[in-house]
Image (cartoon, rainbow, N blue to C red):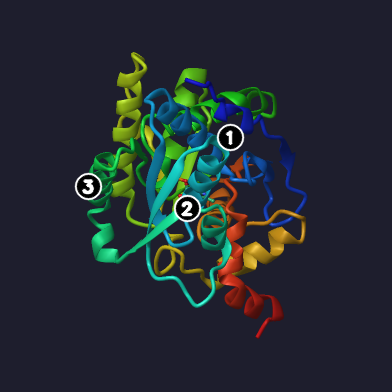
Amino acid sequence: MKTINPHALTCATPVEEFPGTMSKARIFIKRDDLNGLLISGNKARKMAYLVADAHRHGCDTLITCGGIQSNHCRTAAAFARRFGFNCHLFLRGKPGKNYTGNLLLDHLLGAHVNYVTPSQYTVIDDIMAEYAERLKKLGMHAYVIPEGGSNATGCLGYRDCMIEMNAFIRQQRIQAVYCAVGSGGTYAGLLLGKNLAGSHVHLNGIIVCDTVEFFKNKIERICTDALTMHKLSFTIRHKDITLIDGYQGTGYGIPYPEELHTIREVAKHGIILEPVYTGKTFYGMLQDIKRKKYRRVLFVHTGGIFSNFAYARILSVSLRGD
Ligand SMILES: Cc1ncc(COP(=O)(O)O)c(C=O)c1O
């Protein structure tokens, strides 16, 4: 079997200080938005592990799922193209007249796109498993990746990221790290890395959908699976997981005025956030810093720039101040 190295596409990313004056604290930004194939952000670190695993298992096809503007699905399509896999996506929702943002890239990258309703999406793992069986009958060998690439394999990308940030966290006496939580894998990996590095930094995840209880259970499960898989002897429990509620707005992918204001202000310093994950997380972080009186924090910028194009109308209104 020809060897491939998907990890060659991810790299150690820089940390820079945010020059804005939106907070009394010093805010540093881990520029993971710059990472990976097609500036894939957090999805590249996870996908590198998943694609390497798919290759190890002799698979020729990737199957995965997400929202219609999923950054994760676009990353899967890009890695599949680069490493010679077929890619089948299950996207929740309906396409508009014109493709835009990530959906446009999915199509350009030649992924096979299936659209599913929100109710079908509630059983998406079963749908993907059945689909893999059907492909098997056609002689294909599919590797099924769960939503967001958030499982014991994918999360290892963020274990690496925390270990990469650890020296900076110590040298700069960072009190808290913030990240978005959308399917839980990024936070789970960072938490594993924090334990492995013996760090005491506060790890704060801002949830952008669902509930704290839902994500605590999911993150605990991902960590426990990863600990078992890698024969690590520590445990992760609910009490080790700090998730912050209250910044989801009225639902997944629905922006709100304070968030749009944050996106505009941060962009003035050359950093592009987006309305689904990082806009909500940066805004939530600013509020949390005030509450907890932190002086030095690190924001993990998880990327997602392309979904801005799917929000062109609402962002234009916000920029014009209509
Ligand atoms: C840009 C971006 N940031 C953050 C997240 C959240 O990461 P996770 O799904 O690992 O919780 C996602 C995906 O869900 C994302 O696409």
Marks 2 and 1: in contact by CB < 8 Å? Answer: no
Q: Label 3 CB, ligand 1: below 8 Å?
A: no
Drawn side of residue 302 relative to residue 243, left or right: right
Q: Nearer the viewer, residue 116 or 189?
A: 116
In this figure, which residue is indicated by the disc labeled 2? 111
Crowd rating for badge 3 (residues with CA inside 10 Å; few <14, some 14–19, many 20+):
few
228 is higher (above) or lower (below) than 303: above
Crowd rating for badge 2 (residues with CA inside 10 Å; few <14, some 14–19, many 20+):
many
Drawn side of residue 217 relative to residue 277, left or right: left
Q: Nearer the viewer, mark 1 or mark 2?
A: 2
Q: Label 2 CB, ligand 1: below 8 Å?
A: no
9 is higher (above) or lower (below) than 255: above
Marks 3 and 1: in contact by CB < 8 Å? Answer: no
Marks 1 and 2 sit apart, C-alpha to C-alpha, by: 42 Å
Marks 2 and 3 sit apart, C-alpha to C-alpha, by: 19 Å
Marks 3 and 2: in contact by CB < 8 Å? Answer: no
**Residue ID at (38%, 67%):** 93
Amino acid bearing label 3: Glu
**Residue ID at (44%, 66%):** 249
Q: Which badge, 2 or 3, comes first in the chain's sequence?
A: 2
Amino acid bearing label 2: Ala
Q: Is mark 1 on a helix, strand or loop?
A: loop
Q: Which badge, 1 or 2, comes first in the chain's sequence?
A: 2
Q: Can residue 292 be seen in this view?
A: yes
Q: Can residue 178 be seen in this view?
A: no
- Residue 309, percent across and down? 61, 67
**Residue ID at (30%, 20%):** 228
**Residue ID at (47%, 20%):** 1
In this figure, which residue is indicated by the disc labeled 3? 130
In this figure, which residue is indicated by the disc labeled 1? 175
Amino acid bearing label 1: Gln
